[in-house]
Image (spheres, rainbow, N blue to C red):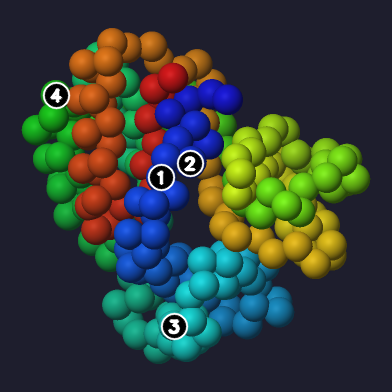
């Protein structure tokens, strides 16, 4: 495991994720709107189909999904949504990679900058942080479905690592094989409980417990910001 990512903290965040269900839905709606903007047909729009699958995994009602797709093609505000990546440094040289969805680029940059600078950090030049991370996919299924046959099948579908507890098993997948891995699981009639995109630090940062708390507090502040889609830092 590498980096202060969803992979390294996913067990501890299960309860928190349930509490933030509304925010998860809000973020998924924005991602569906962006994906559906140019082509609202999931049969011919692979990106939209992926986002719909993610929404269904999170148990988003079909009515919410349909409404988001319709809004993307008929609402001028949704047409202005864009995805942006912001890079920053926090306390003790910690690195932050922030994915946001916004209808006002300058406002979002200014407000994220305000959060960062008020917590002993500063914005970074474009490209100076993103290279410190690598993209992954995390799929969660019930641990009762796990067996050697499935493991061997998924190794051929980009499986890199697993985390297991009494209830769930988390599967770390190479993003190039995301669709293939999901199909392999579903073809076994296994329900996917969650699916998350992740960014993992290539060289995790070691800090004292006091500094760790400061960095994690900043991470939470950024994550709670309305335009944030996801935030990652490079803590070990």
Q: Name the residue under label 3.
A: 64
Label 4 sits on a secondary structure element that is: loop
Q: Where is residue 135 in the image (x, y as percent from the top left)?
A: 57, 38
Q: Mark 4 points at which residue?
A: 120
Nearest to viewer (mark 3 / mark 2): 2
Q: Earlier in the sequence, mark 4 or mark 1?
A: 1
As drawn, the label of residue 10 is 2
Q: Where is residue 129 in the image (x, y as percent from the top left)?
A: 40, 27
Residue occupying image coordinates x 21% and y 42%: 221
Depth check: 110 or 144 in front? Answer: 144
Residue occupying image coordinates x 48% and y 75%: 60
Label 2 sits on a secondary structure element that is: loop
Per the model, the C-alpha gap separating discs 4 and 3 is 39 Å
- 184 in relation to 78, above or below: above
Per the model, the C-alpha gap separating discs 4 and 1 is 25 Å
- 177 in relation to 127, above or below: below
Q: In this image, 133 relative to 168: left or right?
A: left
Few, some or many C-alpha atoms within 10 Å of disc 1 (few <14, some 14-19, many ≥20)?
few
Residue occupying image coordinates x 75% and y 39%: 159
Q: Mark 1 points at which residue?
A: 13
For the residues bearing labels 1 and 2, Cβ distance under 8 angstroms: yes
């Amino acid at each position: 495991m590498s980096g202060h990512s969803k992979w390294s903290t996913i067990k501890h965040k299960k309860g928190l994720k349930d509490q933030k269900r509304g925010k998860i839905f809000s973020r998924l709606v924005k991602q569906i709107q962006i994906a559906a903007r140019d082509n609202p047909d999931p049969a011919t729009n692979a990106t939209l189909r992926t986002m719909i699958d993610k929404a269904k995994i999170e148990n988003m009602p079909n009515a919410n999904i349909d409404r988001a797709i319709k809004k993307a093609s008929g609402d001028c505000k949704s047409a202005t949504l864009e995805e942006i990546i912001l890079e920053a440094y926090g306390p003790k040289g910690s690195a932050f990679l922030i994915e946001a969805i916004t209808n006002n680029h300058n406002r979002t940059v200014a407000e994220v900058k305000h959060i960062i600078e008020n917590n002993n950090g500063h914005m970074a030049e474009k490209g100076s942080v993103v290279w410190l991370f690598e993209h992954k996919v995390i799929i969660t299924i019930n641990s009762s479905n796990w067996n050697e046959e499935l493991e061997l099948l998924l190794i051929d579908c980009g499986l890199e690592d697993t985390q297991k507890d009494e209830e769930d098993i988390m599967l770390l997948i190479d993003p190039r094989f995301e669709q293939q891995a999901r199909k392999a699981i579903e073809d076994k009639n296994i329900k996917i409980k969650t699916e998350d995109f992740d960014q993992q630090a290539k060289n995790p940062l070691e800090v004292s417990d006091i500094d760790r708390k400061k960095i994690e507090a900043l991470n939470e502040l950024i994550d709670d910001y309305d335009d944030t889609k996801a935030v990652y830092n490079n803590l070990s």
